[in-house]
């Protein structure tokens, strides 16, 4: 712990908060990582469950879950640069487990950027298949079975 105030993890509550989450994704994926806007905005935000981490009114992080039958597709995990390495992504992954279970999912799948694989390994994900390139970034598909 770095002495910072506690943050809250929950679903987005308002249209404005969803817009702020999408803006953070833009900053992280498009500006920082160079992902094309057309890949970042894939037209599926309306079907997603959007989780956020909020501290003292500031949106620190977000992720998205899309439920397809008994599979939860996890994506768009972005943590503001100033808030990294404080366990926030790990907390979002844990909340995503709960949301996915509650929505009837039996497994969660995601495309991990390989540099961050440890994050997902530690959260109980296992790789499935070979490394591939997506939006100019090296990825590996990973899966977690939910009990
Ligand atoms: C990757 C990202 C989501 C991690 O968020 P975070 O809140 O800093 O992650 P956590 O603090 O929960 O990290 C947990 C563990 O994951 C691993 N990890 C996190 N960031 C890492 C990094 N940049 N490089 C290597 N391992 C990393 C570490 O093992 C870390 O444990 P440690 O801090 O004790 O070493 C964040 O850096 C980010 O938004 N990056 C840009 C967007 C991105 O890459 N999204 C993921 C797409 S798959």
Image: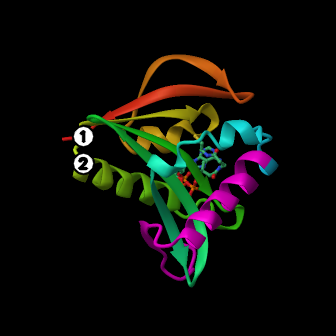
Give neighbour class at mark 1: few <14, some 14-19, many 20+ (Cα, 10 Å): some
- The label shown at residue 146 is 1
Q: Residue furthest left?
A: 147
Vertical order, 128 against 27 (above or below): above
Going 58% across and 82% down the picture, which residue do you hit?
57
- Pick the front one: 53 or 42: 42
Q: Which tag is nearer the camera, tag 1 or tag 2? A: 2
Instruction: Give the image location of residue 100, x and y in percent.
Output: 30, 48
Give the residue at x 68% y 36%: 39
Residue 137 image offset from top left, x and y in percent: 70, 30
Relative height, residue 41 to residue 127 (above, below): below
First in sequence: mark 1 or mark 2?
2
User: Residue 119 location in percent, x, y?
Assistant: 50, 44
- Circle 2 residue: 101
Mark 2, secondary structure of its residue: helix
Whether label 1 touches label 2, CB < 8 Å:
yes
Q: Position of residue 13 (x, y in %)?
A: 46, 72
Dot 2: within a 10 Å radius of its alpha carbon, few (fewer than 14), some, or many (20 or more) residues? some
Instruction: State which region is magenta.
Output: 1-30
Whether residue 67 sits left or right of residue 44 in the image: it is: left
**Relative depth, front residue between 138 and 26:** 26
Q: Quadrant of the C terminus?
A: top left
Please count the marks in the image.
Answer: 2
């Amino acid at each position: 712990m770095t002495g910072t105030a506690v943050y809250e993890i929950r679903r987005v509550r308002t249209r404005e908060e969803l817009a702020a989450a999408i803006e953070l994704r833009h900053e992280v994926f498009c500006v920082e990582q160079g992902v094309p806007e057309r890949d970042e905005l894939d037209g599926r935000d309306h079907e997603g469950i959007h989780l956020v981490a909020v501290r003292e009114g500031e949106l620190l992080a977000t992720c998205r879950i899309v439920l397809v039958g008994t599979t939860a597709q996890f994506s768009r995990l972005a943590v503001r640069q100033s808030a990294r390495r404080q366990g926030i992504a790990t907390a979002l992954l844990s909340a995503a487990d709960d949301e996915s279970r509650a929505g009837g999912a039996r497994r969660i799948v995601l495309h991990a950027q390989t540099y961050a694989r440890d994050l997902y390994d530690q959260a109980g994900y296992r790789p499935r298949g070979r490394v591939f390139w997506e939006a100019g970034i090296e990825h590996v598909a990973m899966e977690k079975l939910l009990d």
